[in-house]
Image: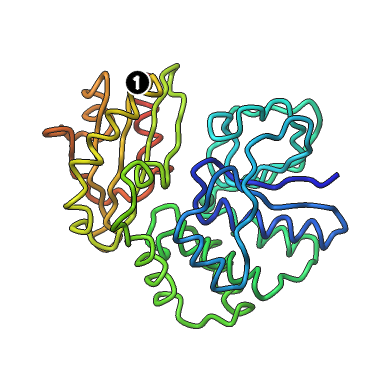
Amino acid sequence: MSIYVFGHKSPDSDAVCSAIALANLKRQQGVDATPVSQEKINPETTFILNRYGFSAPEVMSSFAGKQIILVDFSDLSQGPEDLTKAEILGIVDHHKLGDVTTPNPLECWIWPVGCSSTVLKSMYDFYGVPIPKNIAGIMLCSILSDTVIFKSPTCTEQDQKAAAALAGIAGETDLQALGMEMFKVKSAIVGTPIRELVMRDYKDFNMSGRKIGIGQLEVVDLSILNDVKAELAADIKVLKAEGNRHSVFLLLTDIIKEGSQLLVVSDEPEVVQKAFGAVPQNGEVWLPGVMSRKKQVVPPLEKAFAA
Ligand SMILES: [Mn+2]
């Protein structure tokens, strides 16, 4: 029986590419491992997989009775409904430790770096397994995506080193150009249904007993979103009501200006001022320098909700 390797819901490029890379490592070690994704992959990930000759992994949403390895998450809220009925053999991640537990010891690699593929690079090295050229390519793109071409405050020296080594294996020489090409694909939103945009990079969190949703759209210029901003704001209201959520936040991140417009719908909108020291006007506020949900949005919100 195969072991299934997969990332979080609303899969981003790291969740998908790192699952493919980890399954490759396991297969090279003689383990039957299959990468899958919980939901359909996004256009940026499609671009990456096409570039290096991979097809999209199969979508799979039920894992009861299966052996699994989690990549890029360890929160129950970001996993399948029946996650607790599966056997977790390992976790490879770079987020805060979530709330999954296991009855048995597991292979757990969770490091405070900018991308799961950076951790994976070290796993390949640790086991002395060569990284195939096309796998190096998708791992490199994961790092460029997660670190916003090394600009995110989550980016570490280890990410830079891993990316340089992977670029060498993949034969990529211009990482800025490659990164910008990816972010242009990511920014192309014309014709995409509004809910798909809201959910493209969306995560639910449990903050002091409240269900909090936080989505993020990264674009090369915020003006791209001018025409759809009102619809996005209306849709997160609907999403909040549908899921009985306390709050939904949507970060519209400008990767060139290096900041985010935060759209807010909340039962306690005052939490935004507590967390970020800025007061939303008409449900939105500009947060200069804020690019990372993980490092600059989740921790202050958790603190504000716990207070
Ligand atoms: Mn990641």
Foreground of the two, 152 or 90: 90
Which quadrant would residue 269 be assigned to in this image? Answer: top left
Residue plotted at (35% across, 39% down): 297
Which quadrant would residue 66 be assigned to in this image? Answer: top right
> Where in the figure is residue 208, as x and y percent of width and height?
43, 18
> Where in the figure is residue 50, as x and y percent of width and height?
55, 70
Which quadrant would residue 279 be assigned to in this image? Answer: top left
Residue plotted at (74% across, 30% down): 64
Q: Is the residue indicated by label 1 positioned so its CB lies within 8 Å of ligand 1?
A: no
Residue position marked by numbered label 1 in the rendering: 246
- Image vertical order of residue 101 relative to residue 96, above or below: above
> Where in the figure is residue 221, as x and y percent of width and height?
23, 61
Residue plotted at (64% across, 73% down): 134
> Where in the figure is residue 174, as x and y percent of width and height?
45, 81
- Image vertical order of residue 185 relative to residue 234, above or below: below
Quarter of the image where the C terminus is located: top left
Foreground of the two, 20 or 166: 20
- Image vertical order of residue 29 relative to residue 203, above or below: below
Foreground of the two, 55 or 101: 55
Quarter of the image where the N terminus is located: top right
Residue plotted at (49% across, 58% down): 156
Q: Secondary structure at mark 1?
A: loop
Residue furthest to the left in view is 281
